[in-house]
């Protein structure tokens, strides 16, 4: 079974830029996987940031952007703020199934 | 505006059953699939499967066959998740999510404990 891979943790300085990635244990991610990105803070439901690779969800600031970088989907946060400190999940569409990555814990310090 | 409102927290004993509801509003219910996602305590998101809201046909992810049933009542734009023969390891927050997971319910905590 194909596994969706994410960095377990990442750190960014306030005001800095960070790129989180979403890959496959076997193969490359393309737009055909409709990668989406979610932000989750403890005790809250996931918040949709990006869907279909690079479409920003309503109300999401433009410092969040999605793309394909090499063989992975990527979420870039520019001008990181303290309240960006959260867990970030990606999900990929694989035929009739969706598969979530294990999530990245982002620390802003 | 699109909203998915789920039923409240449940405390169940092992072996019991639970039915979680997810009421949709703000869009045409039968135009988008409904997904179910599990999040065990301290763990990540796990896709359980989805139900075609047009045909009622469910698709279950590996590990979610047998005790898990997705159903619909399109007359009230509501999707349901039923879990039978509950085990302690079913303790989790269960989310419904529309279509390509663009909108999410607030989550329902199901606790299984004797």
Image (cartoon, coloured by chain):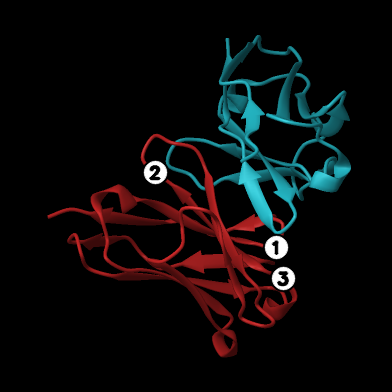
Is the same chain shared between marks 1 and 3?
yes
Q: Secondary structure at mark 1?
A: loop
Q: Is residue B94 above or below residue B57?
A: above
Is the same chain shared between marks 3 and 2?
yes
> Do callouts 3 and 2 mark residues in contact (Cβ within 8 Å)?
no
> Do callouts 1 and 3 mark residues in contact (Cβ within 8 Å)?
yes
- The circle on residue B40 is 2
Cα separation, mark 3 vs mark 2, equals: 26 Å
- The circle on residue A14 is none
Kindly identify which residue carries mark 1: B99
Looking at marks 3 and 2 on the same chain, the residue that comes earlier in the sequence is marked by: 3
- The circle on residue B32 is 3
Q: Where residue B53 sits: x, y (%)?
A: 65, 77
Residue B91 visible in this rendered orientation of the protein: no
* Between A50 and B35, the one nearer to me in the picture: B35
Give the quarter of the figure containing the N terminus of chain A.
top right
Q: Where residue A10 sits: x, y (%)?
A: 61, 15
The subunit letter for the residue under badge 1 reads B
The subunit letter for the residue under badge 2 reads B
Report the chain shown in red.
B
Q: Residues within 10 Å of mark 1 (few under 14, many from 20)?
A: some
Q: Secondary structure at mark 2?
A: loop
């Amino acid at each position: 079974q194909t596994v969706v891979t994410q960095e377990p943790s990442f750190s960014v300085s306030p005001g800095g830029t960070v790129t989180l990635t979403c890959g496959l244990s076997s193969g490359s991610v393309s737009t055909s996987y409709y990668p989406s990105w979610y932000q989750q803070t403890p005790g809250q439901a996931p918040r949709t940031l990006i869907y279909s690779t690079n479409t920003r969800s309503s109300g999401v600031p433009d410092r969040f952007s999605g793309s394909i970088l090499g063989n992975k989907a990527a979420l870039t946060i520019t001008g990181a703020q303290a309240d960006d400190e959260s867990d970030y999940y990606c999900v990929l569409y694989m035929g009739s199934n969706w598969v979530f990555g294990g999530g990245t814990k982002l620390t802003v310090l | 505006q699109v909203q998915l409102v789920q039923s409240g927290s449940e405390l169940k004993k092992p072996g019991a059953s639970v039915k979680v509801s997810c009421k949709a509003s703000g869009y045409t219910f039968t135009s988008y699939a409904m997904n179910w996602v599990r999040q065990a305590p301290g763990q990540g998101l796990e896709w359980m499967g989805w139900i075609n809201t047009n045909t009622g046909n469910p698709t279950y992810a590996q590990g979610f066959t047998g005790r898990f049933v997705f159903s619909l009542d399109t007359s009230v734009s509501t999707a349901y998740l039923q879990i039978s023969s509950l085990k302690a390891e079913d303790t989790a927050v269960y989310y419904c999510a529309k279509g390509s997971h663009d909108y999410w319910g607030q989550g329902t905590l199901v606790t299984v404990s004797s």
